[in-house]
Image (cartoon, rainbow, N blue to C red):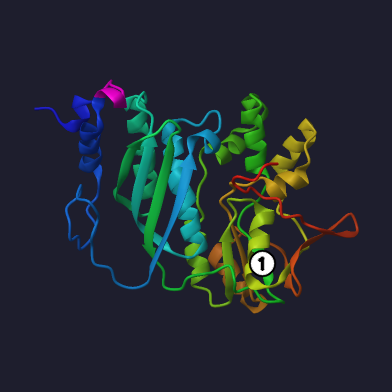
Amino acid sequence: MTGPSQEITGKSLAQVGERSLLKYIISRLKQPEKALLQPGDDAAAFNWEGGLVTCLDVLVAETDVPPGMDWEKAGCKAVVAVVSDMAAKSASPKYLLVGLGLRGDMSMDDFKALWHGLESTASLYGASIIGGDLNQCSSPFISVTAIGAAVKTLSRSGARPGNLVACTGLFGSTAAGLHALLNGIPDAASPRLLEKVLSPRARLREGLALGRIEGVTSCVDSSDGLAESLHCIAEASGVGIHLTSLPVDPEAREYADKHGLDFLKMVLYGGEEYELIFTFEEEYLGDVQRALGGCFNIIGSVVGGGGVTFEHAGKMVEVARIGWEHFLKR
């Protein structure tokens, strides 16, 4: 007797059909705790206790999958993107709903790789896939909805003048790796720079740790770029942000110098770094250090007024809000 996986091996989605593909997916779905419906029903239903946090992110193959990223890594990235948003709210993802729009000529090998990427990355962050939707689409996409819990949620709107501004990690590496991939020169970038693009990771541990610190006042993820993230906090909180230093990745700067690129733009506007930008009261610096260790950098302070400024070459300059924005022509 053959199972759903054996029956569809070596075929395309068009040859397999929706029903057989759904059988394969349902056979791999996890059962929620205190489930009220079986996997494969019209919805997932379960009892929930405590605060619920949910968010959704969509990966579109045409715009979000760079050269060199296979279907397994695309599945990983789709999960990382939504987990990063959860991390910024200090929420722990528990369940995922996955919506797939795929081409009929996609092979089952590619589909299984995609599903493995989704499944393994969900498990990495302590979550499981419990349902979703499947459709045919000429431009493939992956939509992931996360459902999770938080004891204390962090918002964008809590920053106050006098707070310190900090971030996890360093910036510019994703922009450097992406430049190499888009220009067909992957050997010009180090494996680490390429991995930042092809195998990103969410700062879930750090986000959960920040939520346990009373003095943390705001947090946002940096997927749309460092500058945009800072502007989001400033706008939502009704404050200004003044940068005193930039979290420059030395390897990215070396790549920028070698290829005649503007490293400041790479750091401020690169995007898809999946780091956390946060503000906190200075008296809690020791708590932040103990929680994050060396995995953060203080880059400025919250001030009155609005916007984002930076001291560069002895001059005060405004950091323009030109992060990634869908639909906007540039």
Q: Compared to 120, does 203 lie above or below?
A: below
Quadrant in which the N terminus is drawn? top left
Towards the viewer: 4 or 15: 15
Q: Circle 1: is it few (<14), some (14-19), or many (20+) Cα within 10 Å? A: some
Quarter of the figure with the C terminus: top right
**Which range is magenta?**
9-15
Locate residue 260: give its quadrant.
top right
**Residue positioned 64% across, 45% down in the render:** 328
Residue 209 percent across, percent down from the top left = 50, 66
Depth order, front residue of 83/231? 231
Q: Name the residue under label 1.
A: 235
Membership of 190 in magenta stretch: no
**Visible residue check, residue 297:** no
Amino acid identity at mark 1: Glu
Q: Which residue is drawn at 53% across and 38% down?
A: 64
Q: Judge whether 225 appears above or below 24 on screen.
A: below
> Which of the 4 quarters of the picture holds residue 284?
bottom right
Q: Is residue 320 shown left or right of residue 160?
A: right
Residue 241 in the image: state x and y as whole percent.
73, 67
